[in-house]
Image (tube, rainbow, N blue to C red):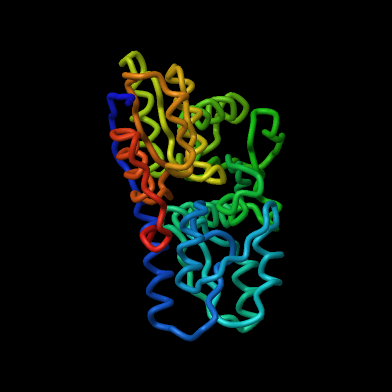
């Protein structure tokens, strides 16, 4: 039987915003046991959380690269829950016009970014928003707003004559944000910068950077491939020089044979990854002869 040295990086489990969103969804079902409840997009970016919500009779409407505005056409009645990623004012107004009962599970850190962006738009600034196209958090900022420019790479930085305010999606890479901030500062030295990477993202990324030259052979990143903060953790692992990066949604994605015997393994997880799934991987690595079956009812 293979044996490994295993290190669990901190923090693990849901961040505060994800925990809050899941709690809101569960309480909504408890308060309205017979109502139709639909989540507009994935409540958080994790397939197993979506399945667990379905287990509680809470449906999710989500189609890749389809905007929240368009997804709302598929919800005709009942309660609609807005996800942790936030929502644009236009989508919120559309839901009200459809006479839907609204429950808003937006992460407070995302709400803070939206508030700051609105303040600077009202002051006459254009917004350079660093984020991912079609990501729901970014969409909540740039949707139907000509004052907001989405910046994914240096080539996206536009030429404008108005004062510039720069901010970002909360789940971006701390290294990528620094590089783009530097590029924008060279072109717009008078621009105002506001780094909005949340603490849950920042601390997880820094923990991986701290592994550089510590003898870690393998980094296992537990999380959904649709989760931006999870993807960034894997990218940071490569920058930290860790030889083998394994991305896993659950214990079923772990191939023991691909890991060298006595390897020194570090385990991290995205902020929307259930601790239940991470613990299963940890226990499996400790005892590869024993592999538990995932039980959806244990996810939430």
Q: Nearer the viewer, residue 138 or 297?
A: 297
Quadrant containing the N terminus is top left
**Corner quadrant of residue 269:** top left
* Residue at (52, 70) in percent of width and height: 81
Q: Nearer the viewer, residue 186 or 258?
A: 258
Which residue occupies the extreme bottom position in the image? 34
Q: Relative to 244, is 250 above or below?
A: below
Q: Relative to 116, is 168 above or below?
A: above
Task: Please give the count of numbered marks on the rendered protein.
Answer: 0
Left or right for 211, reference 226: left
* Residue at (40, 51) in percent of width and height: 293
- Residue 193, given in percent of the width and then of the height, sits at 49, 38
Quadrant containing the C terminus is bottom left
Left or right for 75, reference 242: right
Q: Relative to 36, is 59 above or below?
A: above
- Residue 105, given in percent of the width and then of the height, sits at 45, 65
Left or right for 24, reference 168: left
Q: Nearer the viewer, residue 102 or 300?
A: 300
* Residue at (39, 82) in percent of width and height: 31
- Residue 71, given in percent of the width and then of the height, sits at 68, 65
């Amino acid at each position: 039987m293979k044996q490994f040295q295993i290190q669990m990086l901190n923090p693990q489990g849901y961040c505060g915003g994800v925990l809050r969103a899941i709690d809101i969804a569960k309480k909504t079902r408890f308060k309205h046991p017979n109502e139709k409840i639909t989540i507009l997009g994935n409540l958080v970016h994790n397939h197993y959380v979506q399945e667990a919500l379905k287990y509680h009779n809470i449906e999710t409407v989500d189609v890749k690269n389809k905007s929240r505005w368009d997804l709302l056409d598929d919800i005709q009645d009942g309660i609609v829950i807005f996800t942790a990623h936030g929502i644009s004012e236009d989508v919120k107004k559309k839901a009200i016009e459809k006479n839907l009962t609204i429950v808003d599970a937006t992460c407070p850190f995302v709400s803070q970014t939206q508030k700051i962006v609105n303040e600077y738009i009202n002051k006459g600034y254009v917004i350079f928003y660093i984020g991912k196209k079609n990501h729901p958090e970014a969409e909540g900022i740039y949707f139907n707003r000509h004052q907001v420019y989405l910046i994914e790479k240096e080539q996206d930085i536009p030429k404008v004559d108005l004062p510039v305010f720069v901010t970002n999606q909360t789940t971006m890479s701390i290294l990528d944000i620094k590089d783009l901030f530097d590029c924008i500062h060279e072109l717009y030295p008078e621009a105002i910068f506001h780094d909005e990477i949340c603490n849950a993202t920042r601390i997880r990324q820094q923990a991986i950077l701290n592994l550089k030259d510590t003898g870690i052979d393998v980094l296992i990143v537990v999380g959904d491939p649709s989760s931006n903060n999870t993807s960034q953790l894997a990218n940071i692992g490569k920058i930290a020089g860790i030889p083998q990066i394994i991305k896993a949604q659950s214990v079923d994605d772990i191939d023991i044979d691909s890991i060298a015997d006595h390897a020194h393994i570090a385990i991290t997880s995205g902020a929307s990854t259930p601790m239940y799934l991470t613990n299963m991987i940890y226990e499996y690595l400790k005892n590869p002869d024993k592999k538990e079956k995932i039980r959806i009812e244990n996810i939430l």
